[in-house]
Image (tube, grey):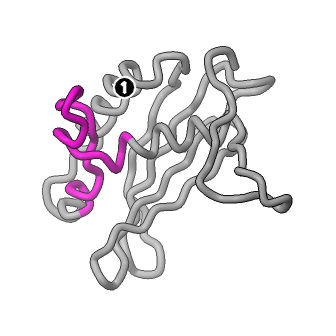
Amino acid sequence: MEGIGKEICFTLDNFQQPRLLSPKETIARMILNLFLLRPGNIPSLPHIGIDIQSYLYRLEDDFDPEEIKEKIYTQCAEIVSFISLGDVKVFVAPLNGQDVLIVAIPIVGFEEDDSTLLLGFKQNEKNELSVAYEFQKAIQNI
């Protein structure tokens, strides 16, 4: 994908050299950072940040997936404008008796085939944010 390269990570590889992230991993981390940031965290871009943790408190009450989708589209377009997003899906799924917020972001035109970035957010027993993500081949129907 043009415009994205390998990013250096703060860990070492098996040869004790700085680990390089793949372009896919770089994109995933850039998008994940948007979810974890709160508006105002970056002084030069005070409106940037989805603050996903605030949505986890509202899952049972006034959860609005459209609000999250709108933030994803506008903020990804501003920060990671070199990727094209498909139809983003935001939904809640039960896992072991706890609600998990799932976000599926299709990345269009990525490498040879389209991929979907799946992000899962929940709070653990200590009310700390727990995050998991992975890429899958394009998901047709969620």
In the rendered image, residue 86 lying in the magenta stretch gets the answer: no
Taking the spot 34% from the left edge, 84% from the top edge, the residue there is 125
Outermost residue on the bottom side: it is 125
Instruction: Count residues near mark 1 (Cα–Cα under 10 Å), then give few for <14, some for 14-19, many for 20+.
Output: some
- Total marks shown come to 1
Say whether residue 14 is left or right of residue 127: right
Residue 95 is situated, as x and y percent measured from the top left of the image, at 47, 73
Residue 86 is situated, as x and y percent measured from the top left of the image, at 52, 25
Q: Which residue is mark 1?
A: 73
Question: 20 or 72, which is in the foreground?
Answer: 20
Residue 21 is situated, as x and y percent measured from the top left of the image, at 68, 43
Say whether residue 20 is left or right of residue 9: right
Taking the spot 36% from the left edge, 45% from the top edge, the residue there is 35
Outermost residue on the right side: it is 15
Q: Is residue 99 above or below residue 89?
A: below
Question: 142 or 99, which is in the foreground?
Answer: 99
Say whether residue 35 is left or right of residue 87: left
Q: Quadrant of the C terminus?
A: top right
Q: Is residue 114 above or below residue 54?
A: above
Taking the spot 69% from the left edge, 33% from the top edge, the residue there is 6
In the rendered image, residue 35 lying in the magenta stretch gets the answer: yes
Say whether residue 88 is left or right of residue 5: left
Q: Is residue 43 above or below residue 123?
A: above
Residue 1 picture quarter = top right
What segment carries the magenta color?
34-56
Taking the spot 72% from the left edge, 39% from the top edge, the residue there is 22
Magenta stretch, main secondary structure class: loop
